[in-house]
Every structure is written in structure tokens, then in C-alpha cells.
Image (cartoon, rainbow, N blue to C red):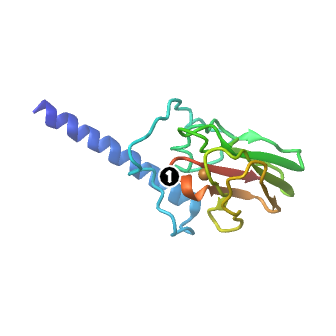
């Protein structure tokens, strides 16, 4: 009896959380993106997330569930006022060198973001969710890829081979 009750409650909580996350994503994307189904579930159960501060509001930027499985996400790093910002590709995180660092940055429009490969963690790439930029798949240290962000918006990107592992990032352009 009590066992069934526990099960029911757990199922209920999970379902509610998923529904909330889904509606947040839908509200954020406005239904423009039908190509990804990264609901954050079903990825092998390796959900090591030690810190749980991903829900803290930071300036009102709503990433939906994008950063839910990104182990090194710790809010948005403010890089406004800089004409060029570097993001490390293959930084430590997500169970290996499978992270962008910092994963989320805020920049002014007109800023060029330069991604620089450490050479660790195998081959990585930088692929925009909306298709606006995409690098080659590279494993060499020192390799760089850059993109100029000329219009305001939130641009999510990921490394294709490690997206499910949590190698994801975002550039918030003001
Ligand atoms: Cu990668």
C-alpha cells in the first residue's frame, strides 16, 4: 500500500517537472524549433549534477531546460563592454574534458566570440541550435573558431558529439 503511494507521488512529481520544463521551453522558443528533442531525459542516467543553483534567476534570461545537464553551468558570465570574448572548448566538466568554459556569456551586440580548443576530450565542434554558425569537428589544441554576434538575442550552441553529455553553451547578446 504505502509502496504504491510512494510510487504514485514520485511519478506525479516527475511528470509535473517535465511538463513545467516543456512549457518553459515552448514559451521561450515560440515553437520555432522543431528539430531538437533535448528534453533532458533518457540520457543514460548519468546525472552527476552536484550543484543545484541552475534555477536562480540571473537577470531574467530564460534558458528553459538547456543547462539542466550542464555540470559546469554557474550562471551567465558578464562580458559586456568587451569587443572580443574567448570561450574554451574542451574544458574540464561533465565527466571529462567535455565542457565549454564559461558555458554562458553575456556580450554586447557587435562582439566577436572566439572559441579556442584545448585539445582535450577528443574532437569537439561548436554548432548553433538555430544553424547560424557551425565550426568544423576538431581535436587539435589551439584551434580557434569565431563568430560575430551582430544582433540581440540568446544563441544556444552545443558540441554535436557531446551534447547529450552536457557540452552545451549559450551567448546572450544585448
Ligand atoms: Cu565535445
Residue 50 % position (x, y): 50, 30
Specify the quadrant of the image occupied by residue 137: bottom right
Residue 71 % position (x, y): 56, 38
Q: Which residue is drawn at 64% across and 50% down?
A: 169
| Outermost residue to the left | 1
- Relative placement, left or right, of 13 versus 110 is left
Depth check: give the residue in front, 94 or 137: 137
Q: Which residue is drawn at 63% across and 35% down?
A: 74
Residue 25 % position (x, y): 52, 56
Residue 103 can be seen in this image? no
Which SS class for mark 1?
loop
Depth check: give the residue in front, 85 or 151: 85
Q: Residue at x 38, y 43 (%)?
A: 45
- Relative placement, left or right, of 16 versus 127 is left
Q: Does the residue labelled 1 lie within 8 Å of ligand 1?
A: no
Q: Residue at x 75, y 46 (%)?
A: 87
Which residue position holds label 1?
Answer: 164
Residue 56 vs 126, above or below: the answer is above
Amino acid at each position: 500500500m504505502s509502496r504504491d503511494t510512494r510510487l504514485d507521488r514520485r511519478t506525479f512529481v516527475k511528470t509535473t517537472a517535465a511538463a513545467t520544463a516543456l512549457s518553459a521551453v515552448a514559451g521561450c522558443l515560440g515553437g520555432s524549433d522543431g528539430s531538437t528533442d533535448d528534453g533532458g531525459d533518457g540520457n543514460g542516467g548519468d546525472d552527476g549534477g552536484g550543484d543545484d543553483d541552475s534555477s536562480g534567476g540571473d537577470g531574467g534570461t530564460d534558458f528553459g531546460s538547456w543547462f539542466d545537464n550542464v555540470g559546469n553551468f554557474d550562471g551567465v558570465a558578464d562580458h559586456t563592454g568587451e569587443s572580443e570574448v574567448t570561450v574554451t572548448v574542451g574544458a574540464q566538466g561533465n565527466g571529462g574534458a567535455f565542457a565549454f568554459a564559461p558555458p554562458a556569456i553575456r556580450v554586447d551586440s557587435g562582439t566577436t566570440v572566439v572559441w579556442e580548443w584545448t585539445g582535450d576530450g577528443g574532437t569537439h565542434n561548436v554548432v548553433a541550435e538555430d544553424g547560424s554558425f557551425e565550426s568544423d569537428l576538431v581535436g587539435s589544441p589551439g584551434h580557434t573558431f569565431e563568430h560575430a554576434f551582430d544582433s540581440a538575442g540568446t544563441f544556444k550552441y552545443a558540441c554535436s558529439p557531446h551534447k547529450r553529455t552536457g557540452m552545451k553553451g549559450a551567448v546572450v547578446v544585448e
